[in-house]
Image (cartoon, rainbow, N blue to C red):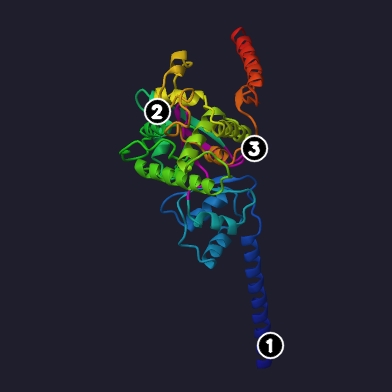
Amino acid sequence: MWRNIASNALTLFILILIVGVGMIAWGKREFTQAGPLEQAICLKVDRGSSFSRLSSKLDELGAISYPQIFRIGVEYSEKSSLLKAGSFLVPEGASMEEITDIVTRGGASTCGTEILYRVGVLNAVMQVRELDPATQKYKVTAEFKPSELEGNAPDRYQTMRDESDTRFRIAVAEGVTSWQVVESLKGADFLTGDIAELPQEGSLAPDSYELKAGSDRSELIAAMSNAQARILADAWENRIDGLPYANAEEALVMASIVEKETGLAEERRQVASVFVNRLNKGMRLQTDPTVIYGITKGQGALGRGLRQSELRRETPYNTYVIDALPPTPIANPGRAAIEAALNPDSTEYLFFVADGTGGHAFATTLKEHNANVAKWREIEAQRANQ
């Protein structure tokens, strides 16, 4: 009898063991395989939340099938104390393991609300944007220009500015001047601190900068300056031979001229080649943007055409009169313009003029150039009569 009892007990133990091993294997499979989420979502995790509350929320959103398995899996992977607050993009079909990684890895929120401040050549625009998880595209829900603001900012902006999981970003366009950057940053009320002095022209790297609410303006300027110094140093190190620059600073001046002369990426190296060829031949650059900078000092757009008297007046920035580069950059050039100035195309071009399509017509002789100018004036006349 005892033998039968022992045999039955052993059999039961083996069955329990088999079931236990099977349950563990099933749970592990459920934790790692693709989940039931049919469409990407933006998952908001509040400060002070727990995996227990999060598992219930995920269950309600249809992102997981078994909340208990999710909690056990989190414990087993030793991540139960690593939950981060924020808004996180959870992709379609994400497994419980992937979701765990998303909400514990840290870093900035990956979806939800973003306040984007676009600092452009003509104006600076503040936008409140929401990421649509399904399309991965942003939708602007509020927009205004701080410089034109009368009274308070839109309610939507004020509300989202104070939310803990709102992300902040400043996008500085290529070709803005240092004065424009500093003046625009004064309109970003989510930043703090003052900028003690105007940064040197050309010393700030146009780019997109992720920030936190309360970031210091002077620290942002320092980051932009350090980035530009690295970009210029790398490009100078990889420059081609035979360039007419005494140092990297002169290359930066050239890059700023290239930046202001063309907005087409495919033209930058051609435009740079024209100016390099002219310098190598001892010709004047004869470029309008430098003359304009001499008038405005980079403090906004001229807002009109250049006068003949301005083209004849001798100033350090009038390249129709001076025989070399102007003394400083005329804007903050981007990486592509800097690289173009230090690696221009190999051409014999000495002239260029607008061609009516947004680009330029290039020429090697004055006769060719005059013909291109005549075509451009014809286009201008036709547009004026429309």
Image spot of residue 73 (x, y percent): 56, 64
Name the side, left or right, on which 179 lies relative to 100: left
Disc sitting over residue 146 in the figure = 2
In the image, what residue type sits under mark 2?
Pro
Disc sitting over residue 317 in the figure = none
Q: Earlier in the sequence, mark 2 or mark 3?
A: 2
Write down the residue under mark 1: 7
| Label 1, label 3: how far apart the Cα atoms are | 90 Å
Name the side, left or right, on which 348 lies relative to 211: right
In the image, what residue type sits under mark 1?
Ser
Which is closer to the viewer, label 1 or label 2?
2
Tag 3: Cα neighbours inside 10 Å, few (<14), some, or many (≥20)? few
Q: Quadrant of residue 281?
A: top right
Which is closer to the viewer, label 2 or label 3?
3
Q: Is residue 379 above or below residue 3?
A: above
Q: Is residue 122 visible?
A: no
Q: Quadrant of the N terminus?
A: bottom right
* Magenta region includes residue 133: yes
Asked if the residue under mark 3 is in contact with the one under mark 2, i.e. CB atoms within 8 Å, the reply is: no
Q: Which residues are magenta?
A: 108-137
| Label 2, label 3: how far apart the Cα atoms are | 44 Å
Write down the residue under mark 3: 346
Q: Earlier in the sequence, mark 1 or mark 2?
A: 1
